[in-house]
Amino acid sequence: KMTKGTSSFGKRVNKAHTLCRRCNRRSYHIQKQTCAACGYPSPTKRSYNWGAKAIRRKTTGTGRMRHLRTMSRRFKNGFREGTTAQSVRKTTKA
C-alpha cells in the first residue's frame, strides 16, 4: 500500500546534516557545506534578533568561559603578575 505517512518514514536513511566543527551541533549541511545553527564557514556567527531566546542560549556565560572567568578579578588588580599577596593580619600595639 502506497502511503505518505508511517511506512514512508521507515525509508529515511540518508543524513543531510552532520556535526559542525565550530558549534558541535548536528546542523552542518553536507551538500550546502554550511551550518544551519552557527553559519560556519562564515566568519561571523549566525544570529538574528527575531530569535532572542536562541541568542540567550548561545551567549557568553552559558559555557565554561575558561579564560574570561578570571578576567574581572585580574582587571581589578591591574593585571599584576609574579607577586605574592600581602599579609592581611592586623599588627597589635604592645
Image: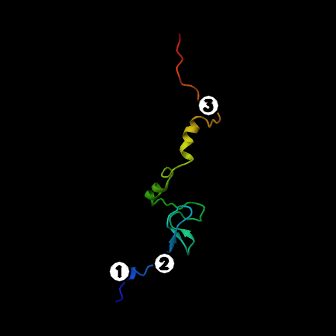
The correct choice, above or below, for 17 with respect to 44 in the image is below
How far apart, in angstroms, are the residues tagged by discs 1 and 2? 17 Å
Q: Count the marks.
A: 3
Q: Position of residue 50 (x, y in %)?
A: 45, 61
Amino acid type at mark 2 = Asn
Above or below: residue 90 compared with residue 63: above
Q: Which residue is mark 1?
A: 6
Residue plotted at (59% across, 30% down): 85
What residue is at 55 percent from the left and 46 percent from the top? 68
The numbered mark, 1 or 2, whose residue comes first in the sequence reads: 1
- Residue furthest toward the right? 82
Q: Residue at x 52, y 20 (%)?
A: 90
Crowdedness of circle 1 by 10 Å Cα count: few (<14), some, many (20+)? few
Q: Is residue 5 visible?
A: no
Image coordinates for residue 28, horizontal then vertical, percent? 53, 68
The residue beneath circle 2 is 14
Question: Where is mark 3, residue-wise?
Answer: 84
- The residue lying furthest to the top in this view is 94
Task: Assign a secondary structure to mark 2.
Answer: loop
Sequence-wise, the earlier of marks 1 and 3 is 1
For marks 2 and 3, give the CA distance: 60 Å
